[in-house]
Amino acid sequence: MPHYLRLFLLIVAAVVPLAVLQFMTQHSLWQDRENEVRNDTLRLLDLLDAEQQRIAAEARQVLATIVESGVPQAGAPGCQQTMDRLRARYPAYLSVEVADRQGRVWCATDPVSLGVDLGGIRTFQNALATGTLTMGEYGLRYPNQRPILPFRLAYPSPDGMPGGPLDGPLGGVVTVLLDARWLEENLGHRPLPPGMEMVIADRQGHAVARLPEAPEAIGEPLPTPMLQAMRAARGTRSVAVFETGGVERMVVSAPLDTGTGESMIAIGIDRDAAMRPVRDAMAFSLALFGGVLLLTCLGAAWGMRQFLRVRERMLETVVEKASVLESTTDAVAELDRSWRVVFVNERARALLPDSGDAVGRNGRQAFAELMAGESGRTLQQAMEHRETVEFETRGPRSGVWFAVRAFPSRKGLALYFRDATERRRLEDERTLLTRQLEAERSLLTAILDHLPSGLLVAEAPSGRIVRVNDTALRLLGGPPPSAAGCGCDGTRACKGGACFGEGRCPLTRALRTGETVEQEDMPYTRPDGTAMTLSVSATPVRGADGRTALAICTLRDVGERKAMEQALQRAKEEADEANRAKSKFLAAASHDLRQPMQSMFLFTGILHRFIRDEQGQRSLEMLERGLDTLKGLLDSLLDVSRLDAGAVDPRVEPFPLNSLLDEIAASYAPILESKKLAFRIVQDRAVTVLSDRVLLGRMVRNLLENAVKYTERGAVQITVRVQGDHVRIEVGDTGIGIPPDQLTRIFAEFHQLNNPERDRARGLGLGLAIVQRLSAILDHPVEVKSQPERGSVFAITVPLAAVETAPAAPPVAASAFTGGGEALRALLVDDDAIVLLGLRDMFREWGYEVRIAGSTDEAVAKIEADGRLPDVMLVDYRLREGRVGTEAVVRVRAMAGRDVPAVILTGEAGPECEMDAAAHGLEVVRKPVTPRQLRRVLDRAMAKQAASAKPVTGAKGERLPL
């Protein structure tokens, strides 16, 4: 039989039962819907009947309550007040009336009922006669002609009330009227199914209530077939189908002997409307079934055509599958149910070279490497239970690991396997690394727990403490809070185990801002009240995204260290205090030491005129040389004392460096010439530096003096190099050099090289100590490089001035006193008589006409008496009675009306003299001074005054330009 005919018969065999099943399903659905509608209507009828009985019971309860509460006995006013309250409380379909024995209504919830006569109503007489609750029939109520159902109960009569004792024990009847509109009020707002009607009828079959509302139908009799069916049903509900108004309805009714016994209830539903959804669904289902049948036939024709194509493709797929299995990276083998090999690809042959030509052989023998031992049992169970299995096995002969997957089917078993030896090796290495990492983690944990420092680790951003070692618990005196961010007060004192808490505390700062805190000392109070000091460090740990992931905090108890630091600080303060006391002593003694030395210098200079023989001149020169050495030693000692006492206040200002270096070179030229040393100054260009001219000059002089002192042959050189915004002043020599281990010690006080016999002619070893102190004061770094036996280079780095200063005045070639013309007048003021006499004789030797005075007042008085002003003044700074020499200079200049050249001579070591002299434009010379030095200073002062174009004046305290 052709394939298409077979397919057609198959479709017919499938469609006929489906069609029969479809028609049976539609019929069953129709019946189910009818039963559903009938049952739903019966349930609704029961609910409506139950609601009517509930309302009737409520009316009886109201009636009994009114009678028992004695409302009718309260009199007309009290009774009417009660009725008014009940009218507001009871629903509109419920009303109450109170009538006397004659039937006249004298009290009612509805004022329209007052005065109505009920005496002729049968149920009224029955209630009055029997004294029990009597229920009437539905009737029309005056005056609105609404259908009502009355409930009546007699009440006793008190004395003085209508129907008093003479009329019998009963006073009248209380009536509760139930309006049939309770149906509309209770159910009218609820939506009804389409085509549904509800009707309540009285005993005669007249409609008293209806939903949906139809006022014209009230009082009309029910259809005769319906009424007959309702009367025929005794004690049970009836269901029937009637045609009313051209509409076929299914009617469910309750007869008189059910419910209240005074009414009949009927619910009708449009049968056509109720069954319309089922009918529409059946029509749609039949149409759908027909469409599906048509599509099935069309699909069958198309499917037959596709079947033939698929069959061809299947043959092609088989060929392609074999090709794919050959080309796949997995080794593939297929076995039938008898374990005979039916297919093996080339990859399988390569992995199992012993298999040879496995097709047709028993698989257990061909693949012994895969099926030995437990592996064979696993494959046996997979074949028997048709369960896919996956496992790894090691070949017993080759030692190769195979990853095997077995896929059973009804035809046999397909095996996919590959060489897993390398992966297993990597997994073994990973396992080994995991074990090593675990061991290292355990070791790290042990190390952290035994660290001498406390350790806390908090995670970001929550601040939760994730790690605390035992040392931290011991230091903190208990467990820390669960999270960083609590416990620090505003005084930075951490309490209650939270030195890593809120605000400025290190752990929180590291978490929130990423700040690294290094050994910050913080006071800490343990929970037991013990006060201590902790050194706290905190470091953030950032993730790959750069955000802070963790913060590590370390704690160390530094109480002992703090105590030692405090002890060292106290010792240092005591040493500093002793050093300051020493310096103050030397500074205070400087004046007393300088005064007699100054006298010795002056008188030694005077002796040159009186000593003529060669022996005397040599002795005088030796005396002067000893005095020069003594002066150098005293100057060095007192300079160190002034620096240590903080008595040096630098006056930083721009000045040309060339002039300073020229002065220094001129002063040391005789010494260099006497030692036959070459000397030169090398510089790129003239520069202006920003420094204190005097202090920088002292630094260069000390370095140059050291170079000359320790150089016996060769050269000494001063080099000036400009480096950016600084200039480097280098003093180099070819002397003995400095050993490497002495490069830092040479700046110590009293340290000298190659002077074990302490020859004082070579100084005290304070020159470099003074250079170092001046370097710190001026912020001019000093560097030294040296090679033994080859020489040394000392360098001072000085900042360049932002603006160039005016060029310095040319140096004075000779003394201001030339020896011709009228002698210059000199005013000498000093409170030490010996020094004053020595100065007088020295100035006279120089050709000056001299006036001397011991105080300012004496000097002014002598000038006034003489009538001539001095050409130059030399004034001691500290005079008697707390007076100072600058006062004498100011008064004499005021008398002269010009700036008379003046020099301050002092033995003071403090800065007061320099500041006062600088304020008046005066140069200061410190005692002791040699006659040669003093004369050079006087010549410089006279030259400055001569270079002035015009007199210069200024306010008191203002520094005048020179």
Image (cartoon, grey):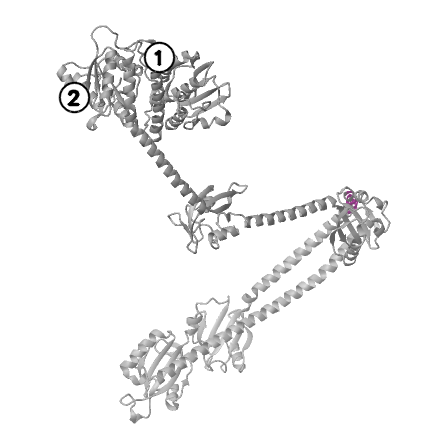
- On whether residue 356 falls in the magenta region, the answer is no
Q: Quadrant of residue 39?
A: bottom right
In the figure, is residue 154 to the left or right of 297?
left
Residue drawn at (72%, 49%), measured in percent from left and top?
Answer: 302
Q: Amino acid at mark 1?
A: Arg
Q: Measured along the vertical axis of the image, is residue 559 above or below residue 739? A: below
Residue 754: percent from the left, percent from the top? 46, 22
> Dot 1 surroundings within 10 Å: few (below 14), some, or many (20 or more)?
few
Q: Residue at x 58, y 47 (%)?
A: 444
Q: Residue furthest top?
A: 820
What's the mark number on residue 618? 1
> Measured from the top left, where is residue 855 in percent x and y?
19, 23
Marks 2, 1: nearer the viewer: 1
Q: Are marks 2 and 1 in contact (CB under 8 Å)?
A: no
Question: Residue 181, relative to residue 669: is it above or below?
Answer: below
Which sits in the foreground, 646 or 894?
646
Q: Residue furthest left?
A: 865
Disc 2 or 1, which lies upstream in sequence?
A: 1
What residue is drawn where x is 66% and y is 58%? 289
Q: Quadrant of residue 98?
A: bottom left
Q: Which mark is residue 858?
A: 2
Disc 2 marks a residue whose amino acid type is Glu
- The residue range painted magenta reads 314-323
Viewed as shown, does residue 491 lie left or right of 197?
left
363 lies left or right of 637: right
* Residue 944 in the image, given as x and y percentages of width and height: 27, 14
Separation (CA) of disc 2 from disc 1? 40 Å
What secondary structure is marked by label 1? Answer: helix
In the image, residue 475 sits, relative to residue 53, either above or below, namely: above
